[in-house]
Image (cartoon, rainbow, N blue to C red):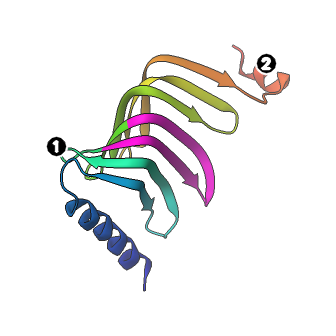
Amino acid sequence: MNFRRKRNLLGATIVLLLAGVAVGQVLKGFRYPDYDEKGQLRFEITGDEAQVQPSGLIQIKNLKMTFYEQGKVMMRVSTPQCLFDRVKRSAASSSDVCVSRKEIELTGRGFAWDAQDGRMKILSNTRVILRNLSAKSVVEGAP
């Protein structure tokens, strides 16, 4: 089975699974992977529980998003509560959020993410922690 067929089948399975779920019903162990045209995993969204809202959005408890580049984990995002729009491929939350990469960690309150433009915005109380930076790289970045 070729990749596009697998991806379409997976997407259809998720839609059918969610379509068969009554509004307000809770699904345990939510997982939503997204692949590029070459079959490489771009991102994966998981959560302990997912509940379809009357608006069609999915309320996810203990959301974790993992982003990949060339098969390697590049960034992780976590928040206790989130609304995911599978049609627009976007997510938003007003809860605390933590974004971590190899050398940087961002925390804050609330976020908005859009897969189409690849942007994530932390809404307030943003804090940045830089890790494992050499003194040379800090000096080079200074004006």
- Which mark is drawn over residue 55? 1
Q: Is residue 25 above or below residue 11?
A: above
Q: Nearer the viewer, mark 2 or mark 1?
A: 1
Residue 33 among those drawn in magenta = no
Point out the stretch of residues depicted in magenta.
59-81
Q: Name the residue rendered at 60%, 21% in the picture.
A: 128
Q: Name the residue rendered at 61%, 47% in the picture.
A: 74
Q: Name the residue rendered at 22%, 47% in the picture.
A: 24
Q: Of helix, strand and loop, which one carries label 2?
A: helix
In the displayed structure, does residue 67 sit left or right of residue 132?
A: left
Quadrant for the C terminus, please. Answer: top right
First reached walking from the N terminus: tag 2 or tag 1: 1
> The residue under label 1 is which amino acid type?
Ser
Label 1 Cα crowd, 10 Å radius (few <14 / some 14-19 / many 20+):
few
- Which mark is drawn over residue 139? 2
Residue 67 among those drawn in magenta = yes
